[in-house]
Every structure is written in structure tokens, then in C-alpha cells.
Amino acid sequence: MTRAARGCAAKNSEDKGVPVCTPKSGIAGRFFLRLKKKGGLNTVNRFKVLSGLFVALLLVVTAQTAMAQSTIFNIPTTDTVSKGKGYFEFDFLSQAPGFDTTRTYLYNPRLVVGVAANAEAGVNFPTYHTSGLPSGSTANFGYIQPNFKWKYYNNDDKGVAVAAGILWNTPLNQRGFQDSWGYIYTDISKKIKSGNYGPRFTAGPYGVLGANQDAASGPTSFVNQPRAGAIVGYEQPIHPKVSIVADWFSGKNLVGYFTPGVSITLPKSGLLNVGYSIGNDSYANSNASKNRYFFAYYGVTF
């Protein structure tokens, strides 16, 4: 499944530095085993060998599954939540840098469940809050984002998987500012099975659905913005519990961000990702640089 990324993107420099809220689109348990020696030289030697083999195998398996996420930061991976399992996540984003007097924050609880073999369904509830606005200004924007993903090909031996899905974004308030819209995608991943720390690459196309393009037709979301592009992801384990990760939605539009960061597996099936999202338009002018966000999320499988 996919999540919302940034909302409340900064306007261009001619807008005098005032942010406007707009929606942006945008898992696996681990365990450790402590082994203790027993008395007797032969027993100890055999136990050392067996335990060493077990730990080596555990490291290989953990390194391969450490990347098993339904998303990286914003882009969907080819992974899906197992049938009958659930995954809850909470995203927090903070505009960094903010404007002189205002700063935008995103709070986004997400829930996804495995509804069938290799298929998942979920819903996001992103809420954007801008602090420091004048009295009477619109500071809060909320959305609901149902989504679905199906992994329709998987070959573990070759490290290849292919998935497709859809996310739909509908405003819960302030509907006069923007219309509902969504996007569809398909992507393919390739896991390089080289040693214990082979990377995984993900890539594919996406296309926007439903958003108005003409301001005269009512609320708009993708006026004069690309409505199709590419999604790209990279996951590089550097430790059984730590990976360097990055993802990118192409296009200078509502979903267009590059987000590098780190992914850390935690006890009790937890996952922590921390990164920095950079809008594809962040280098256009001094105000565009405000379209950047600190990004952190915690997820847990149950």
C-alpha cells in the first residue's frame, strides 16, 4: 500500500511565503536468540559449530527480510502484508526549514491488512496542521486515503516480484480548495542475492486519476503539473537490523519527492524509518526550498 507524503506544500516566491495545504501521496518482525554454552569439551565444540551455523543462517534470513516493508517512505514496494495479519503505522513530518512565521506538520495514522494471498487493503488518515497562521486562517486539512495492492508475480529464487495498486485521496474538510484524486501504479523489484547484504531495487510507472486540470472547473489538485511519472526505490542492508533506504516519485507535482533515510528493525515486530523528503521543485527558487520535510514513522505488525 502507499501513504500520503507531504501536504501543505510551499507556494512559489510570488506568493509571499505563505504555505497552502495540498495533499501529497505518497514490516516485519525480528528476533534474537542468546546462546549459552554447556559443560563438556565435545559438547561445547559441537554446540559452537551448530550455534555458529544457526546464527549465520539467522543473519542471512534477517538481512533478506529486513527490507520487507509495504512502503519505503512514499513509494510502494512489491511486498504485501500476509493474509490474516495487520500492520499499523504512524507517520510524522515536519516542514524543515519552515517559513519565518509558519511551519507545516503532518500526522498520518495508517492501517493495512492482508486480505488474501499476496493482496492487502488499507486506509490512511493524514491531517496537516500549519502553525503560526493569522487568526481565521485555515490551519487544518484532513483526508482519507483508501488503498489496495496486489503482488501478482513472485519468484523468490530469482529475487523478482511485481505488484500493482491504487490509492485514492478524498478531502474530509475544506473541499472548496481541492478535488478528490488518486493514482495507480505498477512496480517490479529485484533483490541482488550477493552475500548477506545484497540490495533491492524497485521501479515502475504511476499515473494520476481524477484531479481537475482547469481552474475554471472547480477545485484543482494537478493544475499544470505532470500526471504521470516513475517511482524508484533502493534498499541496502548494512547490518541485520539496519538498512540505508531511499525512494523517489518523479515529477514536479503533489507526489514528487526524493526521500533518503535509514530503516531500523525494532523488537516486537517494530520498524522505525527516519529520512528527509525533498520536493522535486525545491531548487526552483528560495521559496521552493521550503517544500522539504523531516520524515519519521514507526510501524508494527500484528
Image (cartoon, rainbow, N blue to C red):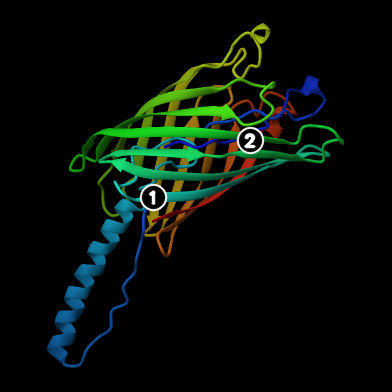
Q: Residue at x 19, y 69 (%)?
A: 53
Pick out the residue farthest to the bottom: 39
Residue 42: % across, % down: 12, 87
Q: Is 227 in front, or is 112?
A: 112
Residue 271: % across, % down: 45, 55
Label at residue 86: 1
Give the SS element for disc 2.
strand
Give the SS element for disc 1.
strand
- In the rendered image, the quadrant that contains the N terminus is top left
Q: Is 95 in front, or is 190?
A: 95
Q: Is 111 in front, or is 193?
A: 111
Look at the image and tell me whether residue 255 can be seen: no
Q: Residue at x 78, y 37 (%)?
A: 99
Residue 268: % across, % down: 41, 64
User: Toward which corner of the image does residue 32 lie, by quadrant?
Assistant: bottom left
* Side of 88 where 56 appears, left or right: left
User: Toward which corner of the image does residue 56 lie, by quadrant?
Assistant: bottom left
Pick out the residue farthest to the right: 135
- Name which residue type carries label 2: Gly
Look at the image and tell me whether residue 193 can be seen: yes
- In the rendered image, the quadrant that contains the C terminus is bottom left
Q: How many marks?
A: 2
Distance CA(mark 1)–CA(mark 2): 24 Å
User: Toward which corner of the image does residue 97 lie, by quadrant?
Assistant: top right
Q: Residues within 10 Å of mark 2 (few under 14, many from 20)?
A: many
Q: Which residue is mark 2?
A: 142
